[in-house]
Structure formats: C-alpha cells, structure tokens
Image (tube, helix red, strand yellow):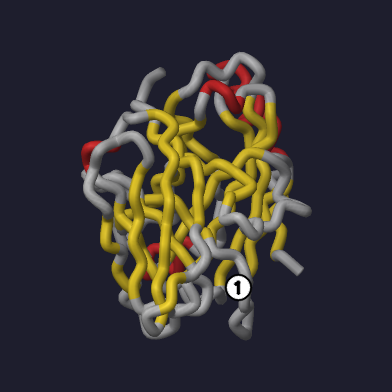
Amino acid sequence: MLHKVILGMFFVPTLALAQADGQVILRPEFAEERHRDAEISGARIMGFSRAQKVSDRSVRIPVSAAVPRAWADSVVCLRVTSVDSLYESRNAYIVNADWGGGIAELDYPTEMATLLNSLLPDGIAALLTKGECAGTELTVSGDGQAGFEATEVTIGGSPEMPPALYLNTFRADETFMWFEGTGLDDVTCEPVEAAARTAYDTVCPLPRELVGAGAVRASVMSFDDGEMGRPLQITVHLPPAAQ
C-alpha cells in the first residue's frame, strides 16, 4: 500500500492560497511508496519530464508542470517513478476552473527528498496526464495510439534543456522518435544510464526547436534484432511559460 502523508492543518491554508492564485491543487492525501522488490509494469510511456539535482541540503524537491489551459476544471494525475521501479508515487491534483494555462507549481511533500535527489536527473521520470490516477493505465492500443496526452514536468532544478520522453521499450536495440508536421529530423533515443532499468530503459530528448510549440504529435518506433516493433504515438504539450 502506498505510504500516505496527511497534510492535516497545513492543507487548508495551502488550498486557500492555491485557489486565490488559480493554481493546481493537490488532493488532501499525498501518496508515495518505496518498494522492497522491483515492480514490473507493462506501461510503455513512463515519463515526459526534465530534471536537475537540487542542493544536497534541500529538504524538498520542487515540482512544476506546464498545464494547458484546456485542462482547466479537471483532475490531473502526476506519476513519479524511479528507473529501478523501487520508488513510485501517484497523486491527483485539481485544476481550477479559471486556470488560464502556464506553469503551475505542484505541491510535492515527499518524505524521500534525499533519495529522489540522488536519482536525478535520469533516474526519476515524471508524467502528468489528464484524468484520475486510479483506473488509468498507461497502455497503448493495438494501432499504437496512446490513450492520453502528457505535458512537460520539471523536477528539482530548472535545467536549460527541453523535456524528454522516458520509455519502456523492453530493451529494444534501437528506438527513434519523430514529430508530425514539424519538418525536424528524427531523434535517435538513447539507453538510460542505470544499473537497473526495470521501469524504463530509454530516453528520447526533444529537440530545442520544439520548446513552446504547443501540442505536438510524437511517434516512436523501436527495433529489436532487426524486427520493427509496434509504433507508439502520443500528444505532448510544450507550452511557453505564460499562455
């Protein structure tokens, strides 16, 4: 069972401030878990994020996301997973009805800040999608169409780099990514540098030219032993800081 941190007396003033500022509000309970054994998942998309270590003395991990205006008056789910799958959190946030789009600071009261910071940048992947966490599995239908959209998440510091897709390719030999209607060259994805790549094994950095491009359709294809795998498509949101 996920370890739950009750915000208690601190929740009410935080909620009021968030509502006044039109922010994205964490639901009353924050849940995270440190597994004893690796959890194997069949999900293919594990993250759309960028990350940077924070000060070793920091007791918190800043998390922010570029939440589209179209997601106003809805629930979104933030999934944070370590590459070895030993850490995971699944938390829902409420986007206010008057949200105008832009960068939202997400309340992330982890009790494992030291652990998470030690895994940054590529040892932690974050994914923010529209909809409830429960019952929303990150699976892909037979035709390769992803059943959700994702928007960029920043964890820790603010690196001067675009976000990347973190994928579970089941140890494919090669993976490529391209973007419809952009005219950009294909991206060659790289293996994640980690001893245990249980949750995800491949990182696909987005080109700098896509920063602030809005909604972009990304396609991914993997090859293993010369055989072409099942294609994967997902819409990613790359909005500017203010919309």
Q: Is residue 102 above or below residue 209?
A: above
Across and down, in percent, residue 150 comes to: 52, 43
Determine the secondary structure under disc 1: strand
At a point 50% along the width and 31% down the height, the residue shown is: 67
At a point 60% along the width and 73% down the height, the residue shown is: 34
At a point 50% along the width and 56% down the height, the residue shown is: 232
The residue where tag 1 is placed is 34
The reply to whether residue 58 is visible in this rendering is yes
Q: Is residue 90 above or below residue 62?
A: below
> How many discs appear?
1
The three-letter amino acid code for the residue at tag 1 is Arg
- Crowding at label 1, few (<14), some or many (≥20) Cα neighbours within 10 Å? some
Between 155 and 21, the one lying in front of the other is 155
At a point 69% along the width and 40% down the height, the residue shown is: 131
- Snapshot quadrant of residue 205: bottom left
Between 142 and 86, the one lying in front of the other is 142
Across and down, in percent, residue 240 comes to: 34, 26
